[in-house]
Image: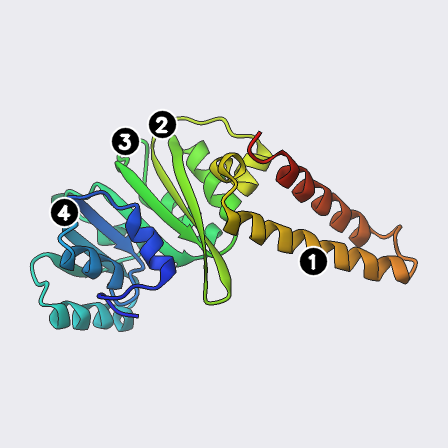
Amino acid sequence: MDATQLSPRLALVASFVLPGARLADIGSDHAYLPAHLLLKHQIEFAVAGEITAGPLANVEQEIQRTQLQGKLVGRLGDGFAAVQPTDQIDTVTIAGMGGRLIADILTAGHSTNQQYQRLILQPNIDVDVVRTWLQANHYALIDEAMVFDDQHYYEVLVAQPGETAFDAPQLKYGPFNIKQQPPVWRERWQREADRLANLMTQLSTKAKTDTPAYARYQAQHQQITEVLDNAGK
């Protein structure tokens, strides 16, 4: 993977960046995403933020390699500390981190007085934590998508300033996923349901159906099954 050929995961993130955006890519990891968008003339300017010197050196190397000086700026900073008011950023991408870390970065770097036009977030785990943060902090989830890449399922969330009132299952599984039933999403949750059913069978054969673990697996399996059965309704 490089700036000319993104992974399916990063390509999905890139697909939600609007033309002409001024982008901050937090935790940029070689700046492949902003460099790709600039090389395709899809955005005007980008900041690639990194928290330590080593990754920032990789960003600077990519800027030199792609000759994007002046359009792509590498900057050292913890989360949104890498963004300056003069950058006039309207779009933020945060990809490839845990959902709790993404929520922490958003909490530390933002207020309702400084909202961005678009957040594009790709948590590796704890996606529901990110959806919950968006709802609690006056960002409306407007789209979401999932991709299977390198033996992992990845979700991308897209939000803009606004209000939502999603319930707990929607926050966990995704309101747009539940409604639209994308095949990769159904596959991901059917696999999880099958895994839980297998665990329940193992406990059942050992006469351990009265254990807390069995009750937990059963509740999770029932919820997933109900969501899949009611998807699209």
Q: Amino acid at mark 2?
A: Gly
Label 4 sits on residue: 87
Instruction: Give the Cα separation between the discs numbered 3 and 4.
Output: 17 Å
Q: Amino acid at mark 1?
A: Arg
Label 1 sits on residue: 195
Q: Residue at x 68, y 51 (%)?
A: 193
Q: Report the side of 104 relative to 6 (left or right).
A: right
Residue 113's label in the rendered image is: 3
CA neighbours of label 4 inside 10 A, class few (<14), some (14 to 19), many (20+): some
Element under disc 4: helix
Where is residue 65 drawn, in percent x and y? 14, 72
Instruction: Give the Cα separation between the discs numbered 3 and 2.
Output: 13 Å
Mark 2 or mark 4: whose residue is earlier in sequence: 4
Mark 1 or mark 3: whose residue is earlier in sequence: 3
Point out the image quarter for the N terminus.
Answer: bottom left
Mark 1 or mark 2: whose residue is earlier in sequence: 2
Where is residue 199 drawn, in percent x and y? 77, 59
Label 2 sits on residue: 162
Q: Amino acid at mark 4?
A: Asp
Where is residue 223 drawn, in percent x and y? 68, 40
Mark 4 or mark 1: whose residue is earlier in sequence: 4
Mark 3 or mark 2: whose residue is earlier in sequence: 3
Where is residue 45 drawn, in percent x and y? 13, 51
In which image quadrant can residue 213 be found? bottom right
Element under disc 2: loop
Instruction: Give the Cα separation between the discs numbered 2 and 4.
Output: 23 Å
